[in-house]
Amino acid sequence: MSQRPDLLIASNDVKVPIEFQCSTIPIPLLEKRTQGYQKVGMTPIWILHTPQKFTNIPRA
């Protein structure tokens, strides 16, 4: 698998990829990425949209 999550939680034999998706993403691409994780035995958690409190943080 060439994709990697923003955060990977690993405990014992369980790995949970977490994806922070702040920009819009086509549903077919989200499904394709989810299937990529599922092929290697992981079920991702998708966090969609940037919370309002983080939208005004200055960027470097």
Image (spheres, rainbow, N blue to C red):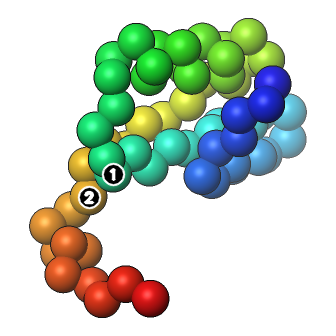
Distance of label 2 from label 1 (alpha carbons): 5 Å
Q: Is residue 36 left or right of residue 22?
A: right
Vertical placement of 3 versus 51: above or below? above
Foreground of the two, 45 or 19: 19
Q: Where does the C terminus fall, quadrant-wise?
A: bottom left
Q: Position of residue 8 (x, y in %)?
A: 69, 48
Q: Position of residue 6 (x, y in %)?
A: 60, 52
Residue with the mark numbered 1: 22
**Residue shown at 71%/34% (left/top)?**
3
Q: Earlier in the sequence, mark 2 or mark 1?
A: 1
**Residue shown at 14%/67% (left/top)?**
52
Vertical placement of 12 versus 22: above or below? above
Vertical placement of 37 versus 44: above or below? above
Q: Secondary structure at mark 1?
A: loop
Q: Where does the N terminus fall, quadrant-wise?
A: top right
Q: What is the number of the mark on residue 48?
A: none
Q: Is residue 60 left or right of residue 7?
A: left
Q: Is residue 33 left or right of residue 40?
A: left
Q: Among all residues in the image, which is located at the extreme front?
A: 60
Q: Among all residues in the image, which is located at the extreme left?
A: 52
| Proximity of marks 2 and 1: CB atoms separated by less than 8 Å | yes
Q: Secondary structure at mark 2?
A: loop
**Neighbour class for label 1 at 10 Å: few (<14), some, many (≥20)?**
few
**Residue shown at 25%/49% (left/top)?**
49
Q: Position of residue 22 (x, y in %)?
A: 33, 51
Q: What is the number of the mark on residue 50?
A: 2
Vertical placement of 53 versus 24: above or below? below
**Residue shown at 57%/22% (left/top)?**
33
Amino acid type at mark 1: Cys
Amino acid type at mark 2: Thr
